[in-house]
Amino acid sequence: MTYIPLTQRPWRRPSTENPTPEALPADWCRPAALGSAIDAWRRWLVDKPQGRWLLHNPAPEAFCAALFALWESGRSAVLPGDGRADTLAHLGQRLDGVMPEAIPHTPTASAPPAPQVLEAGAEALVLYTSGSTGEPLMQTKRFDQLDAELDVQASCWPLEGSVIVSQVSHQHIYGLLAGILRPVCHGVALCGGDGHYPEVMARRLAEARKAEVEVTLISSPAQLSRLPEHLDWPCPARIFSSGAPLAAEHARRAESLLGAPVVEIYGSTETGGIAWRRQASSADWTPLPGVEIQVQNARLELRSAFLEAPEQWWQQADLAEPVPGGFRLGGRADRLIKLAGKRVSLTAIERDLTALTHVTQAHCVRVTRQESQQEGRLGAIVVMEENALPHTHAERRALSEQLRRHLAPRHEAVALPRYWRFVAELPTNAQGKLDRQARERLFADLSDNRKPRWLGELNDGPNQRHVTLEVPERLAYLAGHFDDFPVVPGVVLVQWAIEQAAHGFGQSEGFQGVDRLKFQRPLAPGTRCRLTLERRRDSIHFALESREGRHAAGRLRFRHIATGEVSA
């Protein structure tokens, strides 16, 4: 099973050279079978502009065919960071073209022009990364950068006799390299798309076991930290995780449940892969072959062929200390902001918060309310053990005052968080990162006093969502309802269910009403609750519950229920 670089177009290798096990289901992507779809795309592109083309398609096989057609026709692909309609529309207006989801019909079946040579120094991709500020930043990748990294991974972790199951989005560099380009360069079968659901991932592992082939699982902290124990887990040969640090306890639990080593890859869109570790052996990082590292003024610096300028030293925004054979990370070095003219270290505040019992993680952000012209105050997202989370206004107020008193001796008053969000786990996107969209949702009620306080959600398969909400004490709908005993009006609870369903499942059409509606107990300000949404054929059932019991339930009826998923 020979590794072939991208510049040699490995997707064009004969299918007889590396046959895919016939026992694998037909919906697995087989790189050698992509030729006709690639040619169909190239025929459609014949009279289209050259340059950069937007490509977003969650289906691995369709994505591969479109990507390779762009490359073979001398174009580069622009991969957006998410699939939201406004993101795609904004980028599409600035580019030379947009690839449709399906191959458009072409009037002629004539053979397309000969594929263009893929030059090592040519631009292959444009990716968007959130950057340290959360604003999308453009990052280009040449073929030689991609090939250099793929070659190193092939030497470290060859895929002979294996297939790939990916749980992460191929719209980002880690998922693209590990879940798409690596198996293509090795000529092995791959699948993804809906694999981020544990049940689907378990089924894919079982399919590979039945076909008597090993599986390399491409995952992330977001998936590995939520593995359910009730499923029957066929054992993969190896598990990869990247995108964010994986907690040691989650690494150990994943290895125990799945019965395979978990290899973490440290890197970024800008740098590519930097180092790897297996926490069962050591928490320290070992540089990938060919990656030079040094620590200057406690900052990690590196030089590698994966960088845009391979001969120049690149300084990471991470603190590090050298250890034999590698380095140890010590947090971000660039998380300094100014509040009221004072320099505030977000890292220091987070470190002090996590020193408290029951606090497992903390993340601080600057929060600027839309109606205010001030530079903003500090918001703290505090991850706590389940039994320590506040469920009432009184509990929440007491906890926030306790945390402020804990921080006060070591930080100036302006640095003490004003806005607190207490969560069971950090809301993250598919790459395991707290992105700008999640941060905005956590504090959205500050700028719109009609919204609930959103504290994260879990997906239980494609048709069920569990959304954690809190009733803001300054909710607009509490006024006059009632003066001595404020409660949330029932119609507002129904509206919240509709809004959360639209965000979780996609916008449905033709709202036709609500029935089977029950209001079982009042919902008071400050109450923490869980909204369960279940999508069915023509309706969405909802139930709102708190520690006190069930508050409301009903069925939302629509003419058409969205079947797609909203990207994080």
Image: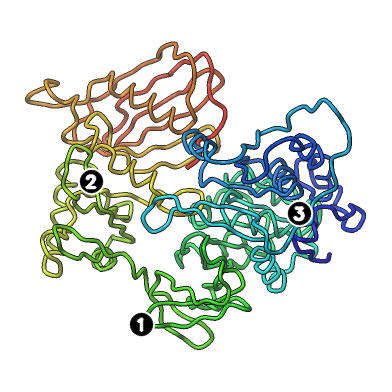
Counting from the top left corner in percent of width and height, residue 357 is at: 26, 64
- Residue displayed at 28% across by 33% down: 452
Q: Are marks 1 and 2 in contact (CB under 8 Å)?
A: no
Counting from the top left corner in percent of width and height, residue 51 is at: 64, 46
- Residue displayed at 60% across by 63% down: 240
- Tag shown at residue 297: 1
Q: CA distance from mark 3 to mark 2?
A: 52 Å
Horizontal arrangement in the rendering, residue 121 relative to residue 453 (left or right): right
Above/below status of 558 relative to 344:
above
Q: Amino acid at mark 1?
A: Asn
Dot 2: what SS? loop
Q: Amino acid at mark 2?
A: Thr
Q: Amino acid at mark 3?
A: Arg
Seen from the viewer's position, the closer of residues 241 and 302 is 302
Counting from the top left corner in percent of width and height, residue 395 is at: 17, 47
Horizontal arrangement in the rendering, residue 234 relative to residue 480 (left or right): right
Q: CA distance from mark 1 to mark 2?
A: 33 Å
Horizontal arrangement in the rendering, residue 89 relative to residue 109 (left or right): left
Q: Earlier in the sequence, mark 1 or mark 3?
A: 3
Residue identifier under label 3: 209
Q: How many marks?
A: 3
Outermost residue toward the right in this view: 16
Tell me where residue 415 sits by quadrant. Answer: bottom left
User: In front: mark 1 or mark 3?
Assistant: 1
For residue 267, say whether it is visible. Answer: yes
Residue identifier under label 2: 368
Dot 1: what SS? loop
